Image (cartoon, rainbow, N blue to C red):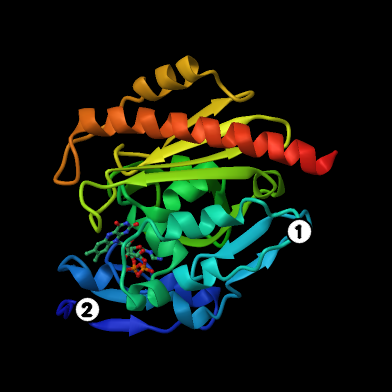
Amino acid sequence: MDLPTIAEVRLPASRADLAALSETVIPLGGGTWLFSEPQNHLTGLVDLMTLGWTPWERRTDGGLSVAATCTMAELTRIPATDGWWALPLFRECAESLLQSFKVWNTATVGGNIATALAAGALIGLGGALDAELVIWTPDGSERRQLVADFVVDQRVTTIQPGEVVRSIEFPAAAMAATTAFRRIALSPLGRAGTVLAARSDLDGAVVLCITGGTSRPEVIRFPGLPEAEELAAAVAAVPTWFTDAHGAADWRQGVSGLLAEEIRQELARSASTRSERTQ
Ligand SMILES: Cc1cc2nc3c(=O)[nH]c(=O)nc-3n(C[C@H](O)[C@H](O)[C@H](O)COP(=O)(O)OP(=O)(O)OC[C@H]3O[C@@H](n4cnc5c(N)ncnc54)[C@H](O)[C@@H]3O)c2cc1C
């Protein structure tokens, strides 16, 4: 779609060039959402892709740092690496966004999270793995925030004019976790009704993140594998189920309970396989 109010698209070469950002001049990632609907409040874009950030890097502490400009395709091509048991969750979450090959090769990690759709494919990933955003602020410094805290409602984040998501940091402990994933939609190719992404840490702690059917990411934590009743009660207590064309709130709540129980059983099986492997 043409964006007729855009007078200029800047091609930054360094961080200094991001000073052009304002309330009406905003970052451009892959453009797959920005160019999909009118943006009449905007006068300019700053194309982050020209900054040439390395898509992803292994941190010295064993964690993973993903640039905001890393595309969906690049994210799912991170090779299996010793200690990164959580990698399958990256593909599962990325594929929960139904998309053409053009979107797959163009949409960025930062753009997906910053768009803050309830069905934000990588918001669930970040929530389940306690990923932290590194956000560049206009004064030249940075702030850090968990993905689950960054998204506060549908299409609402904590980002301020002039700020840019620089990267998403996945801690080494979360990358070493075993994971499980469930998604359901009202139709085979429909937008997600609910998405559940979970991890089980080496110390047994379990983290479940629900998106898609909730207006913000809901992260539920257990010190160990919960009993079925404990898990069901925790899912039922989530306060932010909503109704739209992709599902009714009560359906989303009910089916999430069923899928959470499937995840609980899968994580129990993974934990026993893992302990056999390490003995
Ligand atoms: C028809 C349709 C259906 C969709 N369905 C889904 C879906 O089911 N699930 C889902 O997850 N997504 C869905 N999306 C949206 C999807 O999130 C985006 O297409 C894509 O992931 C956004 O990435 P992008 O790089 O193209 O972002 P852009 O389009 O470039 O930017 C999107 C927003 O993010 C901001 N932004 C981009 N990068 C940064 C950054 N580094 N720092 C700060 N702000 C930034 C932009 O300023 C803009 O506000 C859908 C989009 C369309 C058009």
Image quarter where the N terminus lies is bottom left
Compared with 100, 193 (above or below) is above
Q: 178 or 53, which is in the foreground?
A: 178
Mark 1 or 2, nearer chain start = 2
Residue located 36% across and 47% down the image:
157
Residue type for callout 2? Ile
Secondary structure beneath dot 2 equals: loop
Q: Nearer the viewer, mark 1 or mark 2?
A: 1
Residue located 79% across and 43% down the image:
277
State the image quarter where residue 19 is shown: bottom left
Compared with 197, 13 (above or below) is below
Crowd class of label 2 (few under 14; some 14 to 19; many from 20; radius 10 Å): some
Q: Give the residue pinned by disc 2.
A: 6
Residue type for callout 1? Asp
Marker count (numbered) = 2
Is residue 163 visible to us here? no
